[in-house]
Image (cartoon, coloured by chain):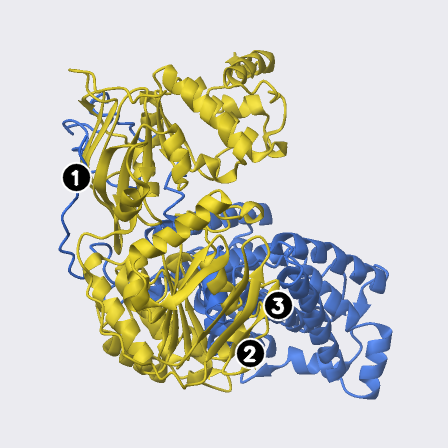
Amino acid sequence: MSSTTVATGTDAPRQPSGTAGRRSGAGFLAGPVGRNLGLVVALAVLCIVGTATAPDRFLAVDNVLTILRLAAVIGVVSIGMTFVIIGGGIDLSVGAIVALSSVWATTLATQAMAADVHWIVMVVTALLVGAGCGLVNGIVIAYGKLVAFIATLAMLAAARGLAEIIANRRTQIVQDRDFLAFFSGDVLGVPTLVVIFALVAVAGWVLLNRTTFGRRTFAVGGNAEAARLAGIRVQRHTMWLYVLSGVTCGIAAVMLMARTTTGSSTHGTLYELDAIAAVVIGGTLLIGGRGTIVGTVLGVLIFTTLGNVFTLNNLSSSAQAVARGVIIVVAVLLQMRLATGSFSLGRLGRGSGTGGLPAPAGAAGTVSGGATPGGPGGPAPGATTDRP
Amino acid sequence: MAVSPPPRAGVPPLLEVHGVVKSFPGVRALDGVDLDVRAGEVHCLLGQNGAGKSTLIKVLAGAHQPDAGRISWRGEPVRLSDPQAAMSLGIATIYQELDLVAGLTVADNVFLGREHARLGLTRPSSANRAAARLLERLGHADIRPTAEVGSLPAAAQQMVSIARALSQDAKLIIMDEPSAVLDSEEVERLFAVIRDLTAHDVAVVYISHRLEEIREVGDRITVLKDGRTVATGLPARETPTREVITLMTGRDIEYVFPERREHPDPDAAPLLEVEGLGLRGSFADVSFTVRPGEVVGLAGLVGSGRSEILESVYGARRPTSGTVRVGGRRLRPGDVAAAVSAGVGLAPEERKSQGLLLGESISRNISLSSLARFARAGFLSRAAEAEAARQQVTALEVRPADVDREVRTLSGGNQQKVVLARWLLRDCRVLLLDEPTRGVDVGARSEMYALIRGLADRGVAVVVVSSEIPEVLGLADRVLVIGDGRVLAEEPAGALDEHRVLDLVMEDAAAHGGPMHTRDDEHAQREGDVA
């Protein structure tokens, strides 16, 4: 055998032949706007169904406000969750933190202090408790290097347990009339709770899209190693993400206290699932690095509207739960389809062997036609593609 | 096997690969690979990191589909459309990261996917007996078929992989750096297994960087470089080491290196001072200085510790001894953010996984380390950010010059420019470049060299690590030759040539039993490293 030396190539700077400008300008429907457009359409369809099945009641101003008021509390939690998930994490403890914050802010001691000073004491207490829980989550995850799922699962159990201990399993009534008056009021006809949700959503949008914090969140979630080597303090940033989530839980706790006039260790049960579902159908990738606040808000509205339509039509909450499950699966399947184009290449090494579909195995020539009628022979050798 | 099996007249080679091409967005990983493997031979595949070995293996294993080229099995053209297709022909692959299920037993792993079962019920005793027979044939009767794989040492796990290949009646076994995790005694036993396999007419494609192993066990050598076969069918024992290494490192065209400045101001105070730096298990007592405008190169084989040195200077690894000073100020060890704010930048070895946010735009990748500059009270001015990115894109001639474009779609060279632009935007004073032309098209390399030189001429202190010795020699003013985690020599680049560097490395290797790394405890930290 002789050694053959291959002559040089003529590689001019090659234009990659792959997908050109997936996100740049042209593809309106493929971009974030397009994905949210799908959610808007889904919401519109729900509204049409609602109007058709309950024409007099669905569009009533009161009903719309009810939907928004219900959406407000879980919506605020979902905003915080959006940050955590974009940053590559998950927070299962949000519901428990809401409960603990509401209980702590309504203890006799806190209420007594609030009576002496101002009801703002209760608000501050709820926010501090939320932030504190988030800080614990953040430290354990970022510096203790515990998997977020486990750390926040532990917080879920511990925070609700602590709430039960503090409340002694009793529901604590909010005594302060000014507090209730303030939060159950409205601003130009819009309930205060809805206004708070709007403010949190806008603040979240600005924080995510217009600040260094938001940009670093995308970087940390998209490629933590690259972010670290670019000089971003990834651990510290991760910690702050959980604190942020905790603060939104504190805000949600205040809103729940106002809506129910109580603090209770049963508040916020299963909020983690509602929030994650809203974030995920809103187009945020669970693996991090990509997501939008607008999508999350739409996701929350879709779920709340769905519940409302079912209630107006006297359908059971069980049927509603089924519909919810279907929506989540469909939305995530769609999301994966959108994402494969951009994500499967990230790990060339792993190959694309995960798609377990029984592809027509073509050990050349051994497979004839396959199921496709009229397709003479298999794909030409050499013209194969990498993806199933 | 002392003698390579001669090509039998009329008998086609077991496996023949011709002109295989495989591109990924932005990089052409294989660009015309030829290889022929005969039954019963040990065919060694050599090449540096990024030469295309891993991609070739994946093509042969059916995990990647080639864009062009021909693969024949016993003279018949075949298409390896998926791993099952390759396996059913008799091609088994033993990957570097062993693909075993740690929680299952040895026997379960050996027969994974082809379980011994009747009526859907597994028959553990039959599987265990069969696994025991296979392991015995491999001379490893000491491995219990009922042991949990995760509890076994690496060498034993490898044997389980080989047993699995045998159970599939493999005719060709591809071993990707099997010796990387083994000690010398285990390597000897592996060789005994390989000899036994080849005696039974099984062919082995053996990948390793340890030339002495290849001499011991190999029959023929194929060398890959930049995704092409540069030599095939070399006799493993007779080919001189220098020829092999020159084939791996040498290039077919002369790169144009920019003119080096005669005197990068010898009186200037050093900008980067590294003193007594060490990282346990990797390198020790490394000292050097870099003045503004100077390019210092670290030359050495893979595993010599070059990359680890760079990463420790940057704080991406925490050195166990020594100090790093930038502009006279000591850096906090193991703190990347501190290094960055002191004006140090790193273009990492694995650009895609360590350097870039592939799904983000050029603009966002460039601004990543300078976000604070575009922010007031935390609020970003995106106009200023995009404008600054645009300036860098123009200055470095990133193509296409569209700052909103996803970095993923750029070629390797342009991706590297984006990484450099990030640090230029930050006005960095010390630039650490790890394999700056890895995955960069041959034609774009000269441009990269000119760029690096231009940075130095603007007063940046540059440290370059490269597997390509001529690249280090052509680019650097001063070169440190690294071998086995120590500085073997420090000389002006003009005083060295490729052979001198190789001699230094080889002498050292001979004295220390192999030009190999000592990374036992941080196994495969970098995927696909060690080339």
Residue under the point 72% across and 63% down: A99
Q: Amino acid at mark 2?
A: Val
Residue under the point 49% across and 55% down: A286
Instruction: Sort mark 3 into few (<14), some (14-19) or many (20+) by Cα contacts within 10 Å.
Output: many
Q: Are marks 3 and 2 on the same chain?
A: yes
Q: Where's residue A54, x and y in %?
A: 47, 58
Residue under mark 1: which chain is it in? Answer: A
Q: Quadrant of residue A62?
A: bottom right
Which chain has been coloured yellow in this picture? Answer: B
Marks 1 & 3, CB-CB < 8 Å contact: no
Q: Where's residue B247, x and y in %?
A: 26, 46
In this image, B144 relative to B47: left or right? right
Vertical arrangement, residue A103 with respect to residue B263, above or below: above
Between B50 and B60, the one lying in front of the other is B50
Q: Earlier in the sequence, mark 3 or mark 2?
A: 2
Residue under mark 3: which chain is it in? Answer: A
Q: How many marks?
A: 3
Q: Where's residue B506, x and y in %?
A: 40, 48
Vertical arrangement, residue A140 with respect to residue A120, above or below: above
Between B183 and B137, the one lying in front of the other is B183
Between A32 and A175, the one lying in front of the other is A32
Vertical arrangement, residue A333 with respect to residue A184, above or below: above
Residue B529 shows in this picture: no
Residue A124 shows in this picture: yes
Q: Earlier in the sequence, mark 1 or mark 3?
A: 1
Mark identifier at residue A239: 3
Residue under mark 2: which chain is it in? Answer: A
Separation of residues labelled 1 and 3 (CA atoms)? 57 Å
In this image, B282 relative to B237: left or right? right
Q: Amino acid at mark 3?
A: Met
